[in-house]
């Protein structure tokens, strides 16, 4: 493996650990489906910001923050388990709608702020 690829793998590993620990902390503060919703909406907003800023950032920003931190922080699998275990229909519908909306708003706001 080349040095640049090794650095990216290390960045993903480090970021994934940090994101996973952050999500675990959020789940301790807000257990259950509403904590999962908060984590996923927040993570989607942050990936929206990152998407706009990526061209200006270091080449390891995407593997570290996008794939690692935000990949470890957000969780589609916990959302799926929440739904299967008896999540409400509003939760089932609200999660993807709010996540996409958060990403869209973050992209638009970040573009406006960086012009």
Image (cartoon, helix red, strand yellow):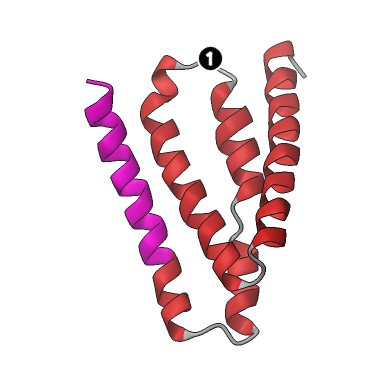
> Residue 85 sits in which quadrant?
bottom right
The residue at 40%/19% (across/down) is 55
> Residue 61 sits in which quadrant?
top right
Along the line of sight, which residue is nearer the eye, 48 or 9? 48
> Is 94 located above or below residue 38 in the figure?
below
Residue 110 x %, y %? 31, 32
Along the line of sight, which residue is nearer the eye, 71 or 88? 88
The N terminus sits in image quarter: top right
Q: Is residue 30 left or right of residue 106?
A: right
Q: Is residue 33 left or right of residue 42?
A: right
Q: Is residue 102 magenta?
A: yes
Query: What secondary structure prevails in the magenta region?
Result: helix
Looking at the rendering, the stretch of residues picked out in magenta corresponds to 96-115
Q: Is residue 94 left or right of residue 84?
A: left
The residue at 75%/34% (across/down) is 13
The residue at 68%/14% (across/down) is 4
Q: Residues within 10 Å of mark 1 (few under 14, many from 20)?
A: few
Q: Is residue 108 magenta?
A: yes
Residue 31 x %, y %? 67, 68
Residue 112 x %, y %? 22, 30
> Is 100 located above or below residue 49 in the figure?
below
Residue 21 x %, y %? 74, 46
Give the residue at mark 1: 58
Q: Secondary structure at mark 1?
A: loop
């Amino acid at each position: 493996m080349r040095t640049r690829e090794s650095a990216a793998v290390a960045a993903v590993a480090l970021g994934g650990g940090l994101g996973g620990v952050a999500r675990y902390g959020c789940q301790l503060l807000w257990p259950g489906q509403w904590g999962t919703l908060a984590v996923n909406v927040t993570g989607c907003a942050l990936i929206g910001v990152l998407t706009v800023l990526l061209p200006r950032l270091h080449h390891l920003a995407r593997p570290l923050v996008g794939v690692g931190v935000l990949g470890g922080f957000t969780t589609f699998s916990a959302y799926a388990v929440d739904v299967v275990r008896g999540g409400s229909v509003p939760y089932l519908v609200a999660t993807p709608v709010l996540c996409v909306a958060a990403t869209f708003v973050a992209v638009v706001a970040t573009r406006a702020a960086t012009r």
